[in-house]
Image (spheres, rainbow, N blue to C red):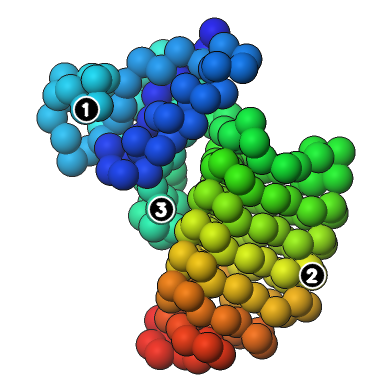
């Protein structure tokens, strides 16, 4: 079994802990040893496991697998950029119920895909993307680095989602559109056309509310 720890101690970390347990119920792949979090005290017990430290401790840790339990794309990127330890490995954590054929999907590293997700063919998912429960990813779609999809998001075919994009729960996209890097899409939005610059967009149809 590979030793693994979770960076983060919020709600998403609880979901990832459960996800790891569900993977282990089939393949017995990981030994969860604890959490890392810069906002918690070392040796504090969280959900039955110890906090092993923050990024400083992680950078001096022996070889270990780490999964990043952070939903905010920019924060996720910043944390990962501060982890300099070359012994750290970022496995892909994919729930056993995910409908995906890796022969037709290009996967980066450090990806989290939760239960009930469907991924179609000729899809590219880049490093450190998080896909929460019951999302669908259409054919020929691309999800850029550090992006996060909340539950029940539907990405249609030929959609290019940029880097550091956050898509809120229940949002839907039209096919053949682009979502620029560093866009935030509010919950329940319907994105009918491309979003070509960093902004917060929401509504049906989704409209720019705040420029970044």
Q: Position of residue 186 (x, y in %)?
A: 43, 75
Q: Is residue 197 left or right of residue 79?
A: right
The residue shown at (61%, 17%) is 26
Disc 1/disc 2 C-alpha distance (Å): 41 Å
Residue 31 place in picture, x, y as percent: 45, 13
Decide if residue 198 is on the left or right side of residue 14: right
Check contact, mark 2 vs mark 3: CB within 8 A.
no
- The secondary element bearing badge 2 is classed as loop
Query: Counting other residues with Cα less than 10 Å from the Cα at mark 1, is it few (<14), some (14-19), or many (20 or more)?
Result: some
> Which residue is label 1 attached to?
46
Tell which circle, 1 or 2, labels the residue nearer the N-terminal end: 1
Query: In the image, is residue 39 above or below residue 197?
Result: above
Asked if the residues shown at circle 1 and circle 2 are in contact, with their CB atoms under 8 angstroms apart, the answer is no
Rendered residue at 43%/35% (across/down): 16
Q: Earlier in the sequence, mark 2 or mark 3?
A: 3
Residue 46, image x, y percentages: 21, 27
Q: Report whether 177 appears left or right of 202.
A: right
Residue position marked by numbered label 2 in the rendering: 158
Would you name the residue on which mark 3 appears? 71
Residue 20: give its label: none
């Amino acid at each position: 079994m590979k030793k693994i720890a979770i960076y983060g101690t919020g709600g998403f970390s609880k979901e990832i802990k459960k996800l790891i347990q569900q993977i282990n119920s089939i393949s017995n792949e990981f030994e969860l040893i604890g959490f890392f979090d810069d906002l918690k005290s070392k040796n504090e017990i969280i959900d039955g496991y110890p906090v092993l430290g923050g990024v400083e401790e992680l950078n001096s840790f022996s070889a270990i697998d780490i999964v990043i339990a952070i939903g905010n794309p920019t924060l996720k990127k910043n944390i990962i950029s501060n982890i300099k330890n070359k012994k750290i490995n970022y496995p892909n954590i994919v729930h056993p119920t995910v409908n995906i054929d890796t022969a037709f999907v290009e996967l980066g590293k450090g990806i989290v895909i939760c239960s009930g997700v469907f991924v179609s063919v000729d899809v590219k998912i880049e490093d450190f993307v998080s896909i929460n429960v019951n999302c669908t990813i259409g054919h020929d779609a691309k999800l850029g680095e550090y992006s996060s999809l909340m539950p029940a998001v539907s990405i249609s075919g030929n959609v290019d989602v940029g880097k550091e994009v956050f898509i809120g729960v229940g949002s839907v996209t039209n096919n053949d559109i682009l979502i620029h890097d560093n866009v935030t899409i509010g919950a329940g939005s319907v994105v009918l056309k491309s979003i070509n610059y960093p902004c917060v967009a929401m509504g049906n149809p989704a409209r720019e509310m705040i420029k970044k």
